[in-house]
Amino acid sequence: MPTAAVTAEMKAKAEVYYGDEICREKFMLLLSEMGFPDRLLILKDIEECGYVKEIGFVWLKHKQKREFRFDNVVVCYDTEVTAYFEPKKIKKLTGVKAKEFLIWITLSEIYVKEKDPPARWITFKTPAGLSKSFPISVFVGGEGQGID
């Protein structure tokens, strides 16, 4: 999967953290601040994460590809995940795929919207413009089940 380049210039402007524990803590805080559920992106063994607040650019680097299952959704995270964050919206997402009907589908955008409050939905969009929505409760609390 192609990823957005994390340049030296971007790193100079970013809040950069190293190590799994602090990276998870900072990333969970960012998800919460942006209005996303806490289990949206589950990554383990994070080596580095960064956030360029001015433009919303985020990156996460970890040791190996990982797959997780959330109910009937299987998600694969590459060794580097990048995205641009806005409140309730993640754009230009790279390094994340979802499995649908035995086919891996690259994701490029994720957003949260409220249909009939209090019902909240999270929508995943592909670069081709196809999308699928799930109740946000699928991604709230607990941990996704790792697939080895």
Image (cartoon, rainbow, N blue to C red):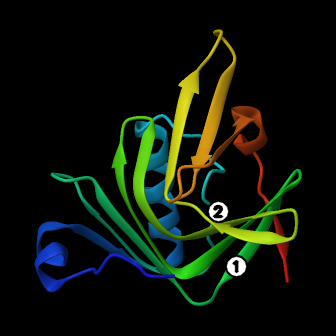
User: Badge 1: how crowded within 10 Å, few (<14), some, or many (20+)?
Assistant: some
Number of marks: 2
> Residue 87: percent from the left, percent from the top?
37, 35
Q: Which residue is mark 2?
A: 42
Residue plotted at (28% across, 72% down): 16
Q: Provide the secondary structure element on which disc 2 rests.
A: loop
User: Can residue 46 be seen in the rendering of this structure?
Assistant: no
**Residue 20 relative to residue 134: left or right:** left
Nearer to me, 128 or 36: 128
Q: Is residue 100 visible?
A: yes
Q: Are marks 2 and 1 in contact (CB under 8 Å)?
A: yes
Residue 102 numbered tag: none
Residue drawn at (38%, 70%) of the image: 59
Q: Is residue 14 left or right of residue 139?
A: left
Q: What is the distance, in whole Å, between disc 2 and disc 1 at their CAs?
A: 9 Å
Residue at image x 87%, y 70%?
A: 102
- In the rendering, at what x and y percent does residue 13 appear? 12, 68
Which three-letter amino acid code belongs to the residue tagged 1?
A: Arg
Where's residue 8, x and y in %? 15, 85
Between 64 and 17, the residue placed more toward the observer is: 64
Looking at the image, residue 147 lies above or below residue 36: below
Under mark 2, the amino acid is Ile
Q: Which residue is mark 1?
A: 66
Residue 28 in the image: state x and y as whole percent: 51, 52
Say whether disc 2 or disc 1 marks the residue closer to the N-terminus: 2
